[in-house]
Image (tube, rainbow, N blue to C red):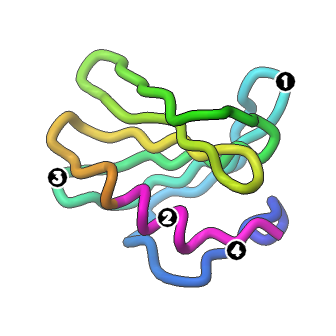
Amino acid sequence: MSNFGIALNSPIGKITHIRLCPIGNTHGLHLVIQGINGPVTLLFLPTVQINQKTPIKHYEFIGFITPTEVGSIAIVGGENEPLENIETKVVDAVEWL
């Protein structure tokens, strides 16, 4: 994660997958963590700036992209996953290097 410019200063949950992924003309750091009801995808996007939280819905997956001090983070999971709790934990834990 540090090679991508991210450090975590507190636990965010069990990480089950991590990979650098192409997103359009940039790259994102793709993590999957174990949520309460199933897997939750986190996509760290340091070059994607947004002004407000933007909802995402794709078939049975829901979530949002949330702005951060550097770029944004997409958080996506199943319909019954408490994603706002994960958002708080992740945003508080991430340190952009």
Q: CA distance from mark 4 to mark 1?
A: 23 Å
Q: Quadrant of the N terminus?
A: bottom right
Give the amino acid type for the residue marked by disc 3 in the picture.
Asn
Q: Amino acid at mark 1?
A: Asn
Name the residue at 62% across, 69% down.
94
Residue 95 percent location from the top left of the image: 70, 72
| Stretch of the chain drawn in magenta | 86-97
Camera-side residue of 21 and 43: 43
Q: Say above or below: 44 vs 55.
A: below
Q: CA distance from mark 4 to mark 3?
A: 26 Å
Q: Is residue 32 above or below residue 51?
A: below
Q: Which label is found at residue 91? A: none
Residue sitting farthest toward the front: 51
Q: Earlier in the sequence, mark 2 or mark 4?
A: 4
The picture places residue 71, in percent across and down from the top left corner, at 74, 45
Q: Amino acid at mark 2?
A: Val
| Mark toward the start of the polypeptide (4 vs 3) | 4
- The alpha-carbon separation of the residues under discs 2 and 4 comes to 11 Å
Q: Main secondary structure of the magenta part?
A: helix
Of residues 27 and 47, the one drawn nearer to the viewer in this rendering = 47
- Discs 3, 1 touching: Cβ within 8 Å: no
Magenta includes 93? yes
Say which residue label 1 marks. 25
Res 18 quadrant in image: bottom right
Query: 74 or 33: which is nearer to us?
Result: 74
Q: Earlier in the sequence, mark 3 or mark 2?
A: 3
